[in-house]
Image: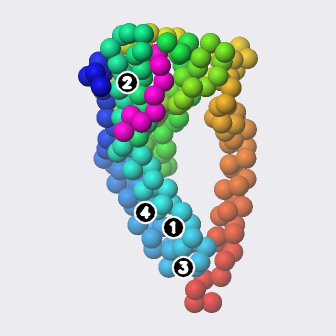
């Protein structure tokens, strides 16, 4: 395989907004670990949070981007170990979905990142490249080298050009929030109402 023109590797350390943000994240893990001894509800919640944290960490560690030298068969590879590939000739544009970072009491914990939806001439989604954990300078280099229009999701929606095949929760972030908030409230009520182990 020819040597790629550009390569970029993600690092879990770049997910954090600062050292303080990383410390707050670990503090949250410690608090959840303590609450896990209170009841089965808190134990289940801790297990879910721990598993999700491990999955995100592993995905970030494995994330790699590669861009071939210009040519008829040039491809953009992304995802775990750059395992997903899209021919540059098939990419008509990229729709950007902003993914805001998290915060704790106004203190940034994780950095903002973007999800790039690669779209063909027919408006179909060819794949999603996530920038989380990548060096912002590398992301900018790829953005310049790809040579296709980049359009924020909000503008694509106004133009009726939301990529076909895009997950509902990303295509309709406001609707996803409207579903997520009451769901989170119900989950917390269930967790709190589960009797403690010593009851």
Residue 38, labelled with which disc?
3
**Quarter-wise, where is residue 96 in the image?**
top right
> Of tags 2 and 4, which is closer to the observer?
2
Name the spot of residue 102 as percent of width and height, x first: 49, 44
| N-terminal-most mark, 2 or 4 | 4
- Residue identifier under label 2: 139
| Magenta region, residue range | 81-88
- Residue identifier under label 1: 47
| N-terminal-most mark, 3 or 1 | 3
Which element carries disc 3, helix, strand or loop? loop
Which element carries disc 2, helix, strand or loop? helix
> Of tags 3 and 1, which is closer to the observer?
1
| N-terminal-most mark, 2 or 1 | 1
The local crowd at label 3, few if under 14, some if 14 to 19, many if 20 or more residues have their Cα within 10 Å, is some
Q: Is residue 11 above or below residue 153?
A: below
Measured Cα–Cα span from mark 3 to mark 2: 44 Å
Left or right of 192? Residue 22 is left
Q: Is residue 55 visible?
A: yes
**Most distant residue in the left direction:** 3
Name the spot of residue 158 as percent of width and height, x first: 71, 17
Name the spot of residue 167 as percent of width and height, x first: 66, 36
Residue 29, labelled with which disc?
4
**Colour convention:** rainbow
Query: Which residue is depicted at the point 41% across and 40% down?
Result: 80
């Amino acid at each position: 395989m020819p040597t790629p023109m550009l390569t970029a590797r993600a690092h879990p350390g770049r997910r954090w907004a600062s050292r303080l943000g990383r410390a707050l994240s670990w503090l949250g893990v410690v608090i959840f670990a303590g609450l896990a001894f209170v009841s089965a509800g808190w134990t289940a919640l801790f297990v879910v949070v721990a598993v999700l944290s491990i999955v995100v960490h592993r995905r970030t560690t494995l994330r790699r981007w590669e861009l071939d030298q210009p040519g008829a068969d040039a491809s953009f590879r992304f995802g775990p170990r750059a395992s997903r590939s899209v021919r540059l000739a098939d990419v008509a544009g990229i729709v950007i979905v902003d993914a805001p970072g998290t915060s704790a009491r106004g203190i940034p914990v994780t950095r903002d990142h973007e999800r790039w939806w690669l779209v063909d001439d027919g408006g179909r989604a060819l794949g999603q490249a996530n920038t989380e954990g990548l060096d912002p300078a590398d992301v900018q280099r790829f953005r310049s080298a790809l040579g296709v229009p980049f359009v924020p999701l909000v503008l694509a929606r106004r133009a009726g050009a939301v990529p076909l095949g895009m997950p509902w929760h990303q295509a309709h972030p406001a609707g996803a929030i409207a579903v997520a908030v009451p769901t989170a409230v119900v989950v917390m009520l269930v967790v709190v109402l589960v009797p403690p182990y010593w009851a």
